[in-house]
Amino acid sequence: MISESPEIEFEEFVKVVRSFCVIFESLQINQKTRLELDLGITGDNGEELFRHLFGYFKIPLPKSERDFREMFKLKPGEKLFHSEGVLPMVKLVKSVDFIQFEQVYPITMGELFEALFDLKST
C-alpha cells in the first residue's frame, strides 16, 4: 500500500507526471502503472522526468550512481529505462530467446512515488 507523504498525495504526483509527459486524462494511472510499458516513458524522456520531479518536489539528487541504484534497488547491469526507440522492438520480438536487450526494471508509479518521498524524508 502506498503511504501518502505528509507533503504530497499520490494524485498530485500523478498530475505532475501527466503534465510533464503530456499524458491524456483518459489514460488511467495508478500505483501499478509502469512508466515504460504502460506510459511509454523511455530513455532520455525518463531521465528528464526524473530531473523534473527532483526539482519540482525539491528532493535532493542522489550523490552518486550507486545511491541512485540503491534508491530503486536495481540489480547489477539493470536500468530503469530502455534506450529510446528500443521499446517497440522489445514488444515486437520479446518471445525470441536469442535476442538480448537491456535489463530494465519495470518501475511503477507507486514505486517511484515511494522512492522519491522516502528520499525526501531522510
Image (cartoon, grey):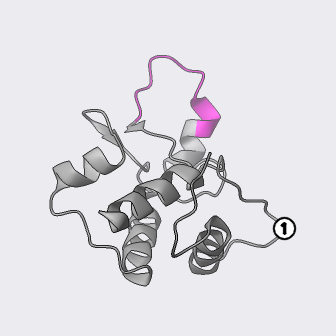
Q: Residue at coordinates 44% horizontally, 18% vertically from top-left?
A: 98
Q: Nearer the viewer, residue 74 or 100?
A: 74
Q: Nearer the viewer, residue 114 or 36?
A: 114
**Hey, which quadrant is residue 44 in on the image?**
bottom left
> Could you say where residue 102 lies in the image, as x and y percent from the top left?
38, 37
Task: Answer above or below: position of 12 versus 31.
Answer: below
> Is residue 85 in view from this perspective?
no
Where's the N terminus, which quadrant? top right
Q: Residues within 10 Å of mark 1 (few under 14, many from 20)?
A: few
Please say whether residue 100 is one of the residues in the magenta stretch: yes
Q: Nearer the viewer, residue 40 or 54?
A: 54
Q: Nearer the viewer, residue 20 or 40?
A: 20
Task: Answer above or below: position of 110 versus 99.
Answer: below
Where's the C terminus, which quadrant? bottom left
Q: With 74 as the anchor, is 31 left or right in this view?
A: right
Task: Answer above or below: position of 94 versus 40.
Answer: above
| Circle 1 SS class | loop
Q: Which residue is mark 1?
A: 26
Q: Residue at coordinates 44% horizontally, 74% vertically from top-left?
A: 53
Q: Which residues are magenta?
A: 91-101
Q: Residue furthest right?
A: 26
> Could you say where residue 86 lies in the image, as x and y percent from the top left?
48, 48
Please say whether residue 59 is one of the residues in the magenta stretch: no
